[in-house]
Amino acid sequence: MKTLIINIKELLQVRDASVLKVSGAEMAVLPTIKNAFLLIENDLIAGFGSMADLPKINADKIIDADGKMVLPAWCDSHTHIVYAGNREQEFVDRINGLSYEEIANRGGGILNSAKKLNATSEEEIYNQSKLRLEEIMLLGTGAVEIKSGYGLSVEGELKMLRVIQRLSQNYPITIKATFLGAHAFPSAYKTNRKGYIDLIIDKMLPEIAAANLADYVDIFCETGYFTVAETEQIMAAGIRLGLQPKIHVNQFNSIGGIQAGIKYNALSVDHLEVMKPEDIEALKNTQTMPVALPSCSYFLGIPYTPAREMITAGLPMALASDFNPGSTPSGNMNFVVSTACIKMKMTPEEAINAATLNGAYAMGISETHGSITIGKKANLIITKPISSYYQLSYAFGSNLIESVLIEGKVFT
């Protein structure tokens, strides 16, 4: 099956296969081709270039993109979209003055989601989650990482990971699964932290690895949740079973989580709303991708990741949605890109790089996703007619996507 897209106003994020991420000043550069074509063969990008150089191609399908932009689909490297119910009451509680921590201390937050998930059937969780997955695909997401972490029990965590696996089998989108049993301490273990960590290490991780249910291991390293020492213990156990770390750090406090993640070769360190100079310094010249979650900052009213400071220091950055029921009930990566520009002062070029190529890197898939490169997956966004790609972040409340192609096929 050959699909040819012609008359593309501007083809964005054109890269050589050797470029797997961009850092520092490179993030401000977005390679493009104006008045372009793109050829898809089956599910892969097979060719592209200027319309002036378009060879004769016998295509099965031709898409005329006159006046429209084409770019790689978003790569969302941090979500929690498998969950049961919602936490809209907590949203109202925050409006009425309660903090995230106060809500958690009253039995809300992660423990609230865990209670709902463990009381909900696997089939119902799948049915709720697939609607969220379909929604983000229509909004332009072509690859997504989904975390567990609302089970906080052996069966609850396995149930979540089985749902993630089923979504991956039933939808063409690339899905990476992350085990986040260390999301919070369940009520039964509030006074027995060691007991829960032993459960994670001795029971959960071996069963998950044996069933091949996860690609990564994650820990919420934060004051009131998991300490740096506990985080290191769980990362080491995951690594022994073949699960590379991707960890939550520096959301509310800087306690050394970034340094621990780097020590254990974490693929990414995520959140980073609170960054000390030593945190930024530690990330220099590492293979660990910093990931910012601006719509979480927007929803909770907490500080934004200091993107300008980090990029100026030469670091790379990825953007992700953090789609979850408590702190970011949205997986709209278009809003994430806009918010990064508006609130974090990232340029449109930086934000697009962060949400495509660097997002793919933060999932370990930048060899196959995240740029317009021959041989990569044909996961694409075709915009509506727009004046320039600046409009993608400028018109923050508008849906400027006309169609989304996942593995070469229009997703509807």
Image: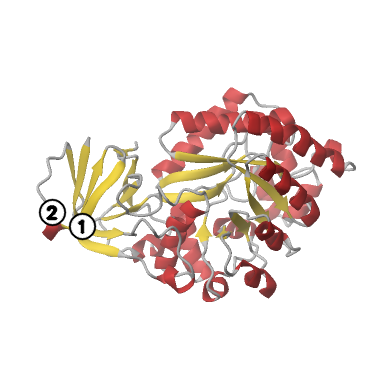
Indicate the position of residue 316 as horizontal and vertical percent values.
Answer: 51, 65
- Among numbered discs 2 and 1, the one appearing first in the sequence: 1
Would residue 336 appear left or right of 45 to someone viewing this image?
right
Q: 125 or 23, which lies in front?
A: 23
> Which of 94 and 45 lies nearest the eye of the viewer?
45
Q: Quadrant of the C terminus?
A: top left
Disc 1 marks which amino acid?
Gly
Based on the displayed image, in which of its 4 quarters is residue 84 positioned?
Answer: top right
- Disc number for residue 49: 1
Residue highlighted by disc 2:
54
Q: Which mark is residue 81?
A: none
Circle 1 — which element? Answer: strand
Instruction: Identify the image quadrant of the N terminus.
Output: top left
Decide if residue 95 is in sight here. Answer: no
| Category of crowding for the residue at label 2, using alpha-carbon neighbours closer than 10 angstroms: few (below 14), some (14–19), many (at least 20) | some
| Three-letter code, disc 2 | Leu
Q: Residue at x 40, y 35 (%)?
A: 172
- Count up the numbered dots: 2
Is the image coloured rainbow, by chain, by secondary structure, or in one colour? Answer: secondary structure
On screen, residue 140 above or below 262: above
Residue 195's image quarter?
top right
Rendering coords of residue 59 (x, y %): 15, 40
* Residue 350 percent coordinates (x, y): 44, 66
Q: Are circles 2 and 1 on residues that touch, CB within 8 Å?
A: yes
Q: Is residue 312 left or right of residue 245?
A: left
Mark 2 and mark 1: Cα distance apart in space? 7 Å
Instruction: In the rendered view, tell whether residue 292 sits above or below residue 63.
Output: below
Q: Secondary structure at mark 2?
A: loop
Q: Residue furthest left?
A: 56
Residue sitting at 12 percent across and 44 percent down? 57
